[in-house]
Amino acid sequence: MNLFQSREGSNAQLVAECLRGSEQAWNALVDRYKNLIYSIPLRYGAPPQDAADIFQAVCLDLFNELPRLREAEALQGWLVKVTTHKCYHWKKQQVPPAAGWDENALNGASKDSPAADWLAELEQEQLVRESVSSLPGRCKAMIELLFFEHPPLPYSEVALRLRLARGSIGFIRGRCLKRLKQILEEKGF
């Protein structure tokens, strides 16, 4: 498995390869952050089509700004900031000024404000997504099927998709969650 097939490569490695023109590295970088980027417009109340448009705009900004990125490991924060900025402008266009939209809602966010809490929650969600992605194949698939499918799948469907006995789902799920907990603790969660 190479750097592009795994999610273990550092941002610095992926950015360096992107700057050398690697399409695989670009795809891996976008794949790493796609859920984070897409989740922000959804939290702003954007419908899926508008969220997809914001996602595309952020990816285009990333592509254009990548050569000027000073610290690759700060990429996640940069993406959150750029996406939030685009969402702010999208939301401003959606809500007439008379409706009471607070233009200073994000600009004056203190560490104790709801916006700061929201950003911290986004960072935690990204950490969980990265940790799930680093699980071994069957555990990763099981966690995704059990906890990320909407509507939730019954055990019988999960067992069918993973080619397991229905009765073994609970036991394997427990082992996978224990491994996920270890990974999260190692990352300081």
Image: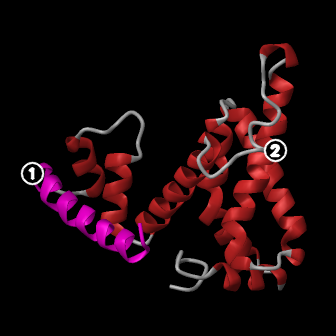
Residue lying at the far left of the rendered structure: 167
Q: Badge 2, how many Cα within 10 Å: few under 14, some, many 20+?
A: some
Residue 65: image quadrant is bottom right
- Please identify, in this view, whether the residue under mark 1 or under mark 2 is nearer the observer: 2
> Where residue 42 sits in the image (x, y, percent)?
63, 37
Asked whether residue 94 is in view, the answer is yes
In the image, taking residue 95 as reference, residue 168 lies left or right, namely left
Q: Secondary structure at mark 2?
A: helix
Task: State the CA–CA distance, disc 1 to disc 2.
Answer: 47 Å
- Residue that carries the numbered disc 1 in the rendered image: 167
Q: Amino acid at mark 2?
A: Lys
Q: Vertically, is 152 above or below 116? A: above
Instruction: Give the residue at mark 2.
Output: 86
Residue 178: x and y in percent read: 23, 66
| Res 123 quadrant in image | bottom right
- Three-letter amino acid code of the residue under disc 1: Gly
Q: Going by the image, does 31 lie left or right of 56? A: left
Most prominent secondary structure in the magenta stretch?
helix
**Residue drawn at point x = 56 percent, y = 86 percent:** 2
Q: Which residues are magenta?
A: 165-189
Instruction: Between residue 51 and residue 157, name the one nearer to us.
Output: 51
Density class for disc 1 (Cα within 10 Å; few <14, some 14-19, many ≥20) is few
Badges 1 and 2: C-beta atoms under 8 Å apart? Answer: no
- Taking the magenta stretch, the answer to whether it contains residue 77 is no
Q: Residue at x 85, y 58 (%)?
A: 60
- Please say whether residue 24 is visible from this viewpoint: no
Residue ID at (76%, 85%): 16
- The x and y percentages for residue 44 are 67, 34
Going from N to C along the chain, the mark reached first, 1 or 2, is: 2
Compared to residue 176, the image places residue 72 above or below, namely below
Q: Secondary structure at mark 1?
A: helix
Disc on res. 158 = none
